[in-house]
Image (cartoon, grey):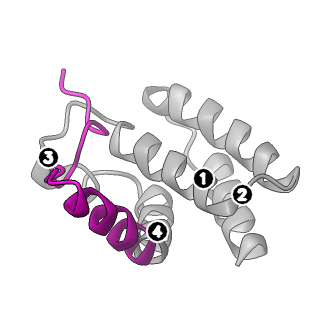
């Protein structure tokens, strides 16, 4: 899974060169390095999901992912599907203490 994630990050970095995504490209490069240096893959995937959700704040929430380039969408769906189990465990922990986290939390920036 690490190798597949690493390849997808590399492809997204290389294929999407629009200057609108410069900050996202910098983040992808940084996360790719961390992943290859042995950092926890869940941590990397959480950061990737957050970065991709913030890649184009001009998109409304409904189109936040579908409006991104194909390489970013593919990376997001790969990461998101693997984080569903992790998210469930985290949400269960919050529910034990009476907190009800928002669906998208604070990972979304608004213009």
The residue labelled by disc 4 is 74
The residue labelled by disc 3 is 61
Identify the residue shown where x is 60% and y is 61%.
Answer: 42
- Residue 53 is drawn in which quadrant? top left
Q: Position of residue 89 (x, y in %)?
A: 39, 71
Which circle marks residue 43 in the picture? 1
User: How far apart, in angstroms, are the residues tagged by discs 2 and 1?
Assistant: 5 Å
Residue with the most extreme top position: 111
**Label 4 close to label 2 by CB (< 8 Å):** no
**Label 4 close to label 3 by CB (< 8 Å):** no
Label 3: which secondary element: helix
In this picture, is 21 found above or below 103? above
The residue labelled by disc 2 is 40
In this picture, is 45 found above or below 79? above
Horizontally, residue 98 falls left or right of residue 17, namely: left
Identify the residue shown where x is 18% and y is 26%.
Answer: 110
Q: Position of residue 80 (x, y in %)?
A: 41, 68
Look at the image and give the residue range highlighted in magenta.
Answer: 84-111
Nearer the camera: disc 1 or disc 4: 1
Label 1: which secondary element: helix
Horizontally, residue 12 falls left or right of residue 18, namely: right
């Amino acid at each position: 899974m690490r190798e597949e994630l690493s390849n997808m990050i590399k492809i997204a970095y290389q294929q999407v060169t629009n200057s609108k995504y410069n900050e996202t490209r910098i983040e992808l490069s940084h996360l790719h390095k961390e992943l290859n240096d042995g950092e926890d893959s869940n941590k990397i995937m959480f950061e990737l999901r957050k970065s991709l959700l913030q890649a184009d704040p001009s998109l409304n929430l409904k189109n936040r992912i579908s409006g991104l380039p194909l390489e970013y969408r593919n990376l997001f769906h790969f990461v998101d599907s693997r984080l569903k189990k992790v998210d469930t465990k985290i949400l269960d922990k919050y529910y034990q203490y009476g907190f009800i986290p928002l669906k998208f939390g604070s990972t979304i920036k608004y213009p």
